[in-house]
Amino acid sequence: MKAVVTVMPKPAILDPAGVAAGRAMEHLGLKKVRSVRIGKSIEIEVDGADEKQLHEICHDLLSNPVVEDYTLRILS
Amino acid sequence: MRVAVIQFPGSNCDTDCQAALASFPGVMAEIVWHKETSLTGYDAIVLPGGFSYGDYLRCGSIARFSPIMGAVRTAADSGVLVLGICNGFQILCEAGLLPGTLLRNNGLLFRCENLQLRVENTDAPFTSVLHEGQVLDIPIAHGEGNYFADPETMKQLEANAQILVRYCDASGNVTLEANPNGSLGNIAGICSHGRNVFGLMPHPERVCDPILGGTDGRGIFQSMIEWTASHDAKK
């Protein structure tokens, strides 16, 4: 099984790294940067797992539910 | 009193904690490797600072699943004192033994400096020999110390007086300027609802000997020792 997990800071959470990157984009000529959010993309290849197990891993290990949301995409 | 100092791969304040604890008469501090699964016989547990598992994924997120953490949870549930310093605080939050989490510092800088903490509450095994409003000089050294919790959790922390130390200026005023990392409410350290689990970002073990520039960290360990002694006497 191949899967991609995307982990993003929740909308209400300030993402200082995103803000800094946004400022750099304006410095490079973008006129008005409204928002930049930096998250993680995690590629997984695993045998003998089901989707429920992967959701548990996403919830318990790969994301911190206090401040992050995740999406799990099964590729094959 | 026997204290376990848990050593994770990447811990780097473990021997400092051990030395600080061992400087108190009657305290035996032992390093316990994270692959161990029992903490029977210890009166207190310290999760030291460092960069467990290289801080990969999120600070503390992998250490939280180390074999020893089951025993830490069992001990915490039974009322044993658990102190998490810096990375140890991050691990306790990831493990759910303390609420909330520690985000990247709002200025993005790794902050390594001496600063001041105000003791907010002394009704806890970690602050009982201190007095409310006391200002402690204790260093910080972290990149992710920006305490965050949802508004409901913040309300609970305030209502239950779980915030034990806040960043303040030299006169003890809790100000925006005194906040090194963006932490909500200038929080430097919180305890659990049961008050026997305490996590803080500053490093008390680094100021336990005058030769290292201060002794303001001693009160936290002294509190733990006295609490344990009075607890044993009651048994």
Image (cartoon, coloured by chain):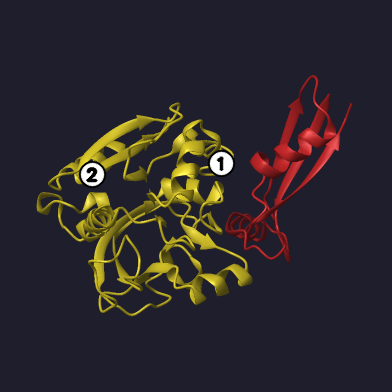
Chain colours: A red, B yellow
Element carrying mark 1? loop
**What type is the residue that disc 1 sits on?**
Ser
| Quadrant showing the N terminus of chain A | top right
First in sequence: mark 1 or mark 2? 2
Whether residue B64 is visible here, answered yes or no, is: yes
Residue sitting at x 24%, y 38%: B29
Mark sitting on residue B1: 2
Count neighbours of disc 1 (C-alpha within 10 A) and say few if under 14, some if 14 to 19, many if 20 or more.
Answer: many
**What type is the residue that disc 2 sits on?**
Met
Whether residue B12 is visible here, answered yes or no, is: no
Q: Find the distance from the CA under tag 1 to the CA under tag 2.
A: 30 Å
Count neighbours of disc 2 (C-alpha within 10 A) and say few if under 14, some if 14 to 19, many if 20 or more.
Answer: some
Residue B42, percent from left and from top:
32, 40
Residue B189, percent from left and from top:
41, 62
Direction left: furthest residue: B211
In this image, B167 relative to B71: left or right? left
Give the mark toward the camera: 1 or 2: 2
In this image, B220 relative to B58: left or right? left
Residue sitting at x 45%, y 41%: B72
Mark sitting on residue B235: none
Are discs 1 and 2 both within one chain?
Answer: yes
* Chain letter for mark 2: B
Direction front: furthest residue: B235
Element carrying mark 2? loop
Residue ID for mark 1: B61
Direction right: furthest residue: A76
